[in-house]
Image: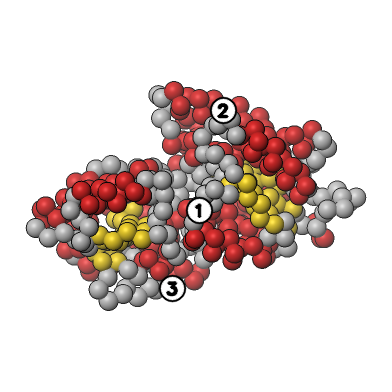
Amino acid sequence: MNEPNDPHAPAGGKLRIVHVLRSPVGGIFRHVRDLAEAQAAEGHQVGIVCDSSTGGAREEELFQALTPHLALGLHRTPMQRHVSPTDLIAFLRLFRRIQALHPDILHTHGAKGGVYGRIIGTLLRVFGSSVARIYCPHGGSLHYDPATRSGRLFFRIEHFMERLTDAFIFVSQYEAETFASKVGAPRKPWRIVPNGIRDEEFDPIETLPGAADFLYIGMMRDLKGTDVFIDALARLRDRRGIAPTAELVGDGPDKARYEAQVQRLGLDRTTRIHPAMATRTAFAMAKVVVVPSRAESMPYVVLEAAAAARPIVATRVGGIPEIFGAEQDRLVPPGDADALADAMADSLDDPQRAFADANRLRAIVRPQFSIEHMTEVVGAVYRDCRSPGSQSAPNRTR
């Protein structure tokens, strides 16, 4: 709880919460936005600190919608993805900004945000603050191979940073298990808190006339399997003599390479590439959503597509099997364009079965993945960390 004589304390024992992340895009940004809005609705004062060089027009729209909920403001400063000499400059800027916000909670997200935020939180404690340092990896460095030099380095950093952490939040069982196997079993309190979605996201979506066969929506990077999706489109064309139609929606560092891949494979007449847009707008543009990821933690696009009862072809990676539950047998291996093409063909050949599968998955997702549950459990973690002398028992359940 806030100290009685703290002039910055919100009324009624509410908290000053600052979310720290590097890249305000994709699922990590959706997670932070949902938490920030829900926490503000509960009366907490919330702020966000993130990179200023990441994101495009779609992210600017989302920031504009979010800003009225941020009593502690939106603070953006350049943060490099990889370790660089500019990190010290970024750190000093971040320290001054976060110190001025007098946070009770520093909720850090992703590898770079986690390092910056937890070190800053530790320095604030040296200066007398009682700020709680919370860390959620969101996959991040956990996607690295422990057999590589970079993987070993990142996992050593994660292991050291645990000393500067008061509690962990993992968005999937997979993420918790991966952390334990690659970094070590957490020695600090931790909870699994799956990503949640809104009630209105279960409203049906009407497919547009002339909709494409397939939709890819997400970050344009190899980790998400965009290249595998394009290869699968070419496989289907070669097998059937006619190319399926497809929409690719998103932005990212490898987008130009995927545009060249579409051209090289002769798919440019049947495949369109768009900038990032609202997910439900994109869902209406195609009959089947394809999630070809090589790695994930708890992807929002799968939850959103399932809630909207859209037929989904997805890979067996990360927390996706946790979403599919009893339906996970229809997931395909990651990185396998032939297997992905097989599953995509099945969804086209039997649309009635594809929609029946989609409705069963919707029924699985609805009771298990809500923003209300996500916010409630995150709030419980905060309270445990702020209670003098209290230690949260590790919890291996959702």
Depth check, front residue: 110 or 343: 110
Residue named by callout 3? 203
> In this rendering, would 237 be left or right of 56?
left
Closest to the camera, between mark 3 and mark 1, is 1
Q: Could you say which is closer to the camera, residue 28 or residue 313?
A: 28
Crowding at mark 2 (Cα within 10 Å: few <14, some 14-19, many 20+):
some
Check disc 1: other Cα within 10 Å, few if <14, some if 14-19, many if 20+: some
Q: Please give left or right for residue 213 compared with residue 188 in the image.
A: left
Q: Secondary structure at mark 1?
A: loop
Q: Residue at x 60, y 39 (%)?
A: 114
**Left or right: where 82 falls relative to 276:** right
Point out the tag, 1 or 2, that comes first from the N-terminus: 1
Residue 69 seen in the current view: yes
Examine the rendered structure and indicate whether residue 71 appears above or below residue 321.
below
Q: Residue type at mark 3?
A: Asp
Q: Would you name the residue on which mark 2 appears?
A: 157
The residue beneath circle 1 is: 55
Residue 195 location (% of width, % of height): 51, 54
Q: Tell me whether circle 1 and circle 2 mark residues in contact (CB < 8 Å).
A: no
Q: Quick check: can you spot residue 384?
A: no
- The Cα atoms of the two marked residues, 3 and 1, are separated by 28 Å
